[in-house]
């Protein structure tokens, strides 16, 4: 009997030791988890501060450029990539791009009505990118004010038949990423198209900056010349940028044709920032649209966490204008 009691006492003692060890290990694990969480929170906060600083730097650069130059070109300071920086474990990189060197998707519709010159230009850009021209019609239907379906287009009736169902926006785009909800704009299409388009928040059509427009957009814009002549004109822009629209037109070959109803410029108001900050396991990507007025710069919108156009909302719904601003 005594041996049995002694054995039980030993077992109980071992059980208490095991429980104490388990509790101690759990406490240490929780402390370690808490410390890791603190480290991650600190890294996220520091990464956010660095990203905020990069955005502030971009706005200051654009403000300075606006005060000292009347022309925007690819040879200016703002157009140079931010040198890769690795300071105290924080890796920073970023670029500024002229948003008016892209085709403004909102130029397609003015006052709720499709602009024929802008639609034709967009079709030519799609052709340059080897994309189906009917993509222009489906987008025009998506953003114009009516529900009348164009040939090759799609209206609310088509989208309501999908799962989940939704309607045409019938309003200007707030982001180029909303193209993901337009018929025909599949991920592979967006990947090819996104470097050449933008959605700018203007009631009137914005001008294309001929100093910064992509070669594909320039080829869509300038008709009647061969590829070599146009490439020579494009190459001039680095060392000998166009002073104004008249200078651009004067340097075009005699047989070159420019479309009527398309505004051109050599100075821009909208710029796109894309930056990435990394610290340890924390990575923050920032995309932002900056507006530079005559005397000030201001942030139009900012998105953290992704750079690529075409992202959808987390719950799978098509984004409304208010959700994407």
Image (tube, grey):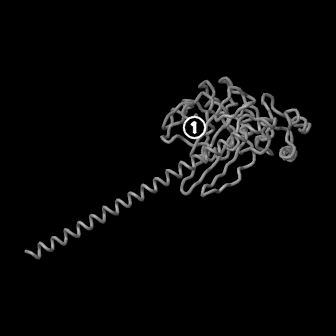
How many discs appear? 1
Quadrant assignment, res 246: top right
Residue 299 versus residue 114 in the image, above or below: below
In the rendered image, the residue lying farthest to the left is 1
The image quadrant where one finds the C terminus is top right
The image quadrant where one finds the N terminus is bottom left
Q: Residues within 10 Å of mark 1 (few under 14, many from 20)?
A: many
Looking at the image, which residue is at 70% across and 30% down? Answer: 107
- Please indicate, yes or no, whether residue 21 appears anywhere in the rendered image: yes
Quadrant assignment, res 90: bottom right
- Residue 23 placed where, x, y %? 30, 61
Residue 108 versus residue 59 in the image, above or below: above
Element assignment for label 1: helix
- Residue 237 placed where, x, y %? 84, 44
| Closer-to-camera residue (113/90) | 90
In the rendered image, the residue lying farthest to the bottom is 3
In the picture of the structure, the residue carrying the numbered disc 1 is 181
Left or right: residue 7 versus residue 256 is: left
- Residue 149 placed where, x, y %? 61, 28
Looking at the image, which residue is at 45% across and 53% down? Answer: 37
- Please indicate, yes or no, whether residue 193 appears anywhere in the rendered image: no
Residue 234 versus residue 146 in the image, above or below: below
Looking at the image, which residue is at 14% across and 74% down? Answer: 6
- Residue 81 placed where, x, y %? 72, 49
Quadrant assignment, res 200: top right
Residue 325 versus residue 91 in the image, above or below: above
Left or right: residue 231 versus residue 140 is: right
């Amino acid at each position: 009997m005594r041996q049995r009691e002694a054995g039980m006492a030993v077992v109980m003692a071992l059980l208490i030791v095991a429980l104490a060890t388990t509790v101690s290990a759990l406490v240490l694990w929780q402390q370690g988890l808490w410390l890791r969480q603190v480290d991650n929170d600190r890294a996220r906060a520091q990464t956010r501060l660095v990203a905020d600083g990069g955005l502030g730097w971009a706005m200051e650069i654009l403000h300075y450029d606006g005060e000292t130059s009347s022309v925007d070109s690819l040879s200016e300071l703002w157009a140079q990539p931010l040198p890769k920086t690795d300071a105290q474990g924080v890796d920073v990189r970023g670029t500024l791009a002229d948003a008016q060197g892209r085709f403004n998707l909102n130029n397609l519709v003015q006052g709720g009505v499709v602009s024929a010159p802008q639609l034709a230009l967009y079709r030519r850009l799609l052709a340059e990118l080897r994309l189906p021209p009917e993509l222009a019609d489906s987008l025009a239907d998506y953003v114009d004010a009516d529900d009348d379906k164009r040939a090759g287009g799609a209206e609310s009736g088509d989208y309501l038949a999908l799962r989940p169902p939704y309607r045409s926006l019938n309003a200007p785009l707030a982001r180029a990423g909303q193209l993901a909800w337009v018929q025909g704009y599949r991920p592979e299409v967006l990947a090819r198209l996104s470097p050449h388009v933008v959605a700018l928040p203007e009631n009137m059509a914005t001008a294309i900056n001929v100093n910064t427009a992509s070669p594909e957009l320039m080829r869509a814009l300038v008709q009647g010349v061969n590829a070599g002549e146009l490439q020579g004109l494009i190459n001039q822009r680095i060392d000998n940028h166009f002073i104004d629209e008249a200078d651009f037109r004067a340097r075009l070959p005699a047989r070159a044709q420019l479309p009527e109803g398309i505004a051109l410029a050599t100075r821009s108001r909208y710029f796109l920032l894309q930056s990435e900050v990394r610290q340890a396991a924390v990575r923050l990507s920032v995309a932002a649209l900056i507006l530079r007025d005559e005397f000030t710069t201001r942030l139009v919108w900012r998105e953290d966490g992704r750079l690529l156009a075409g992202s959808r909302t987390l719950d799978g719904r098509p984004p409304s204008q208010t959700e994407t601003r």
